[in-house]
Image: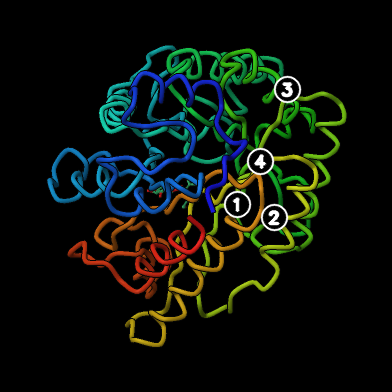
């Protein structure tokens, strides 16, 4: 069944219009679409990947696969504050601009990542150099500078990332300490002013199923929207590990956001395992990828599904979780694994 989705922002429709008949916003299959993007198109759910810009520049098969398989891209690192403003007032948009240009050339929407986070901050942002009032000003300026630079060219932004602890309390970060809990609402208000056409996300990990953290975020999104704060979407990162089992209530979790009229997306999906891999682990992994995509396709307002890298060649997992890896849908030689086939078949069933 073809479903027209409510998820297209004005910027996306404008971008599609620029591309003309090659990419109709009505969910029709498009000549020239290939790989996962061709099976995703009729469902209205975009398929995306995080992009490693060093690999995109140096690795031709990687670059070819990014263009062939995906219709949305997320910069894995190059829109983070430490990259775009390494010293105060000196901006470096080089690699981020390269990704935005690549996306435009390949008919892809860009998910901007990330504006407000406690991690990957430049070292000049700290609580000894600035007062709380100054930090508030700097955060506001950062949002306006970055969103302003890309205004109209970013489909969706991760505005606030990883703001909660596992128990549902707010994470103790430089932003909470300096600005108080209202920093989240402020960030969304500033972001909406800076680029009114972007879909604005609250984004987090360990919120796939229903738990204290996802419930706290659900409550916050609901309350902010009641107060008129411009927050349109909730991003579920989707970093799973098969050794923990797969969450059984992903669909129920998505449904409660859907019932609020809030858009959702899977924003950083990977499913890691304790190495070495084998057939049964690889099968469990495929189920993990599939269950999140299926849940996305079963609700009305889930707008995209992004993997956090599509090949094990560049995945962040082994560097952070010692002894774990093989977390993406393609191996180190960019050969598809069962997870890739599951994604393809799941889109085909829904399309
Ligand atoms: O994949 C990213 C890796 O290259 C960086 O070293 C790391 C630094 O924190 O960030 C990784 O991406 C993270 C993302 O920005 C936010 N959610 C968790 C991701 C994996 O750590």
Q: Are marks 2 and 1 in contact (CB under 8 Å)?
A: yes
- Cα distance, mark 4 to mark 3? 20 Å
Classify 5 as above or below 147. below
Residue at left offset 79%, top offset 47%: 259
Report x, y in % for residue 192.
Answer: 64, 19
Ligand 1 neighbours mark 1 (CB distance < 8 Å): no
Q: Residues within 10 Å of mark 2 (few under 14, many from 20)?
A: many
Mark toward the viewer: 2 or 1: 2
Quote the CA–CA distance across marks 2 and 1: 9 Å
- The residue that disc 2 covers is 254
Mark 3, residue position = 186
Q: Badge 3, how many Cα within 10 Å: few under 14, some, many 20+? A: some
Q: Secondary structure at mark 2?
A: helix
Q: Quadrant of the N terminus?
A: bottom right
Q: Mark 4 vs mark 1: which is more N-terminal?
A: 1
Return the residue at label 4. 263
Dot placed on the residue nearer the N-terminal end, 2 or 3: 3
Residue 253 position by quadrant: bottom right
């Amino acid at each position: 069944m073809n479903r027209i989705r409510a998820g297209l922002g004005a910027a996306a429709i404008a971008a599609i219009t620029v591309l003309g008949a090659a990419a109709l916003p009505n969910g029709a299959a498009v000549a020239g679409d290939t790989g996962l993007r061709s099976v995703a198109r009729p469902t209205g759910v975009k398929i995306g990947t995080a992009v490693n810009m060093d690999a995109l520049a140096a690795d031709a098969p990687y670059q070819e696969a990014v263009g062939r398989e995906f219709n949305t891209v997320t910069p894995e690192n190059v829109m983070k504050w430490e990259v775009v403003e390494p010293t105060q007032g000196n901006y470096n948009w080089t690699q981020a601009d390269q990704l935005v240009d690549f996306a435009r050339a390949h008919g892809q929407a860009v998910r901007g990542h990330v504006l407000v986070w406690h991690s990957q901050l430049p070292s000049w942002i700290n609580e000894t150099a600035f007062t709380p009032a100054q930090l508030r000003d700097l955060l506001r300026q950062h949002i306006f500078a970055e969103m302003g630079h890309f205004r109209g060219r970013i489909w969706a932004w991760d505005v606030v990332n990883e703001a909660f602890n596992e128990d549902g309390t707010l994470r103790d970060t430089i932003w909470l300490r300096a600005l108080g809990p209202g920093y989240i609402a402020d960030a969304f208000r500033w972001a909406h002013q800076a680029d009114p056409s972007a879909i604005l996300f609250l984004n987090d990990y360990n919120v796939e199923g229903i738990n204290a953290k996802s419930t706290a975020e659900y409550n916050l999104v609901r309350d902010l929207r009641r107060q008129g704060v411009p927050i349109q979407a909730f991003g579920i990162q989707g970093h799973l590990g098969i050794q923990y089992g797969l969450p059984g209530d992903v669909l129920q979790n998505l449904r409660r956001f859907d019932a609020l009229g809030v858009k959702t997306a899977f924003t950083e999906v990977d499913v890691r395992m304790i190495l070495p891999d084998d057939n049964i682990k690889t099968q469990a992994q495929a189920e993990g990828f599939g269950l999140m995509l299926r849940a996305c396709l079963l609700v009305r307002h889930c707008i995209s599904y992004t993997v956090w890298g599509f090949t094990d060649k560049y995945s962040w997992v082994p560097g952070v979780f010692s002894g774990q890896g093989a977390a993406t849908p393609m191996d180190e030689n960019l050969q598809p694994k069962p997870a890739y086939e599951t994604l393809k078949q799941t889109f085909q069933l829904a399309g």
